[in-house]
Image (tube, rainbow, N blue to C red):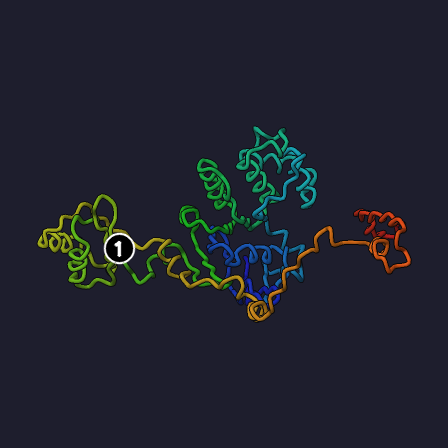
Amino acid sequence: MIEVKHLTKKYGAFTAVNDISFTVENGRIYGFLGPNGAGKSTTMNIITGCLAPTSGTVTVNGHDIYEEPLAAKASIGYLPELPPLYPDMTPEEYLLFVGEAKGVDGVHLDVRVEEVMKKTGLTDVRARLIRNLSKGYRQRVGIAQAILGDPDVVILDEPTVGLDPLQIIEIRDLIRTLGETHTVILSSHILSEISAVCDTVIIISHGRIVASDTLSHLTASADGRRIVTLDVRGPLDGVRGVLDGIPGAVGTHAEYGMDNCVRATVEMPSDADVREDIFRRFAAADLPIVQMTSSDVSLEDVFLRLTEEEETPPEADVPGIRAALDAAPDAPDEQAPPESAEVDADEAGAKDADSPYYGAPAPKKEKEKKKNADDDYTPLFGGKA
C-alpha cells in the first residue's frame, strides 16, 4: 500500500526526519506515535506530497509520490492538523467544491457527498456556515473531505486536538468505522488515543523510528514484564527492606504516597505471579498492605522507555551558533542624548559672541518629515508608483 524508504528531511543543519523506513499494509489502523517535535507531521506531509524530502522515496500503490503525483495522491485522503476549511461555505457547499477538485464524477458527486455527510454525522448541519460550527463538527467536515472520493488510505494528523471529551469519543468511533473500509494512519502524541483505536503502532522519536509492531506485540516484547503495585502502611525503609528480599524481582521502587502509605512497585517476569509471596513477606514484617494490583506493561511504559533520551536543547540544533553567540562581545548600551543637548549649529552660532551670526535671531528649525509607510512602496508586476 504505502512504502517509505530511507526518508530524510533536513532544514539547514537540523534533521527533522532521519533515514526512516516503514510499510503500511491494507486494512489496518496505524498509529503514528511520538512526542511533540518528533517529526510526525513532517513525515505525514512528505507522504502526502505536500513537502519534498531531502532524500528517500515514498510509493503509494506502486506510484512514486513525486514521480507520479496524480496517481499516488488519488489513493490518499488527508486531514492535516489544521483542517483546510472555507468558513464562509456550508459543509455541503464545501464538500461539493472538494469533490469537483478531486475529479469525482459529476453524475455521482451529489450521491458521494450525501454518503460522506451521513458517515461523518454532518447531515443535520449541512446548511450551516462552517464558521458557526463547533470545533468537533469542523473536524468532521475535515474528515469528510478526506474520505470523499473513496481513497484507499486515510491519513489523519492529530484529529482530536482541542476537542472536549465527548467530541473525542465521537471522533474515535468515527475512526474505527473508517477502519472497516479504509487503511487509516492516525498521527498523534496521545497514548490513550492510539491504544483505543489502532492495531499497529509506529513510534518515532527525534526523527527516527524506534519501534514498529502490533500493539499486543509491543507490550508483550517489553522484556515480558508484569508490574505489581501496592500501597503499604509503614516506614519507607521497612518497605524497601522487604522489597529487596523478593526473589526474581527485575526491579523495585518505593516512595511515600497518599494517606500515609508507601507506594511500591515490583517488576517481575510476566510468567511469575508473586502476589501471594509479597503478601506473606509484608505480613511477616508487620507492614499491612492496603491495596495491591497487578498489570502487564502498558503502551505508556513502552513509549516512555523508548523515548526517554534527553532532548537536545534548541540552541544546540545548529552547531556553532551557540559558540558564536557566546563569543560575541556585548554591545554597549545606546543612550540617546538629552533633548536639550540637540542644538542646531546656526542656533549655537547666534549665541556665540565670536560668531558672525552673534545677535542674529536663531533660524527656525524645520521639523523632520515623518516617514510614511507608503514611501517604501515598490511597484510590482509592472505597476507605477
Which of the pair 347/329 is nearer the observer? 347
| Horizontal side, residue 348 vs residue 220: left or right | right
Q: Residue at x 51, y 49 (%)?
A: 184
Q: Residue 205 placed where, x, y %?
A: 47, 61
Observer-nearest of 62 and 166: 166
- Residue 371, percent from left and from top: 80, 49
Is residue 382 among what the camera can see?
Answer: yes
Q: Nearer the viewer, residue 160 or 382?
A: 382
Residue for badge 1: 227
Tell me what residue is drawn at x 23 percent, y 53 percent.
264
Drawn side of residue 57 relative to residue 235, left or right = right
* Image spot of residue 66 (x, y percent): 65, 61
Classify 355 as above or below 292: below
Q: Is residue 119 visible?
A: no
For label 1, the SS is: strand
Above-or-below relation of 67 to 172: below
The mark total stands at 1
Q: Amino acid at mark 1?
A: Ile
Please tell me how crowded label 1 is: few (under 14), some (14-19), or many (20+) other residues with Cα within 10 Å: many
Quadrant assignment for the N terminus: bottom right
Q: Residue at x 52, y 65 (%)?
A: 20
Q: Position of residue 311 (x, y in %)?
A: 46, 62
Residue lying farthest front?
Answer: 353
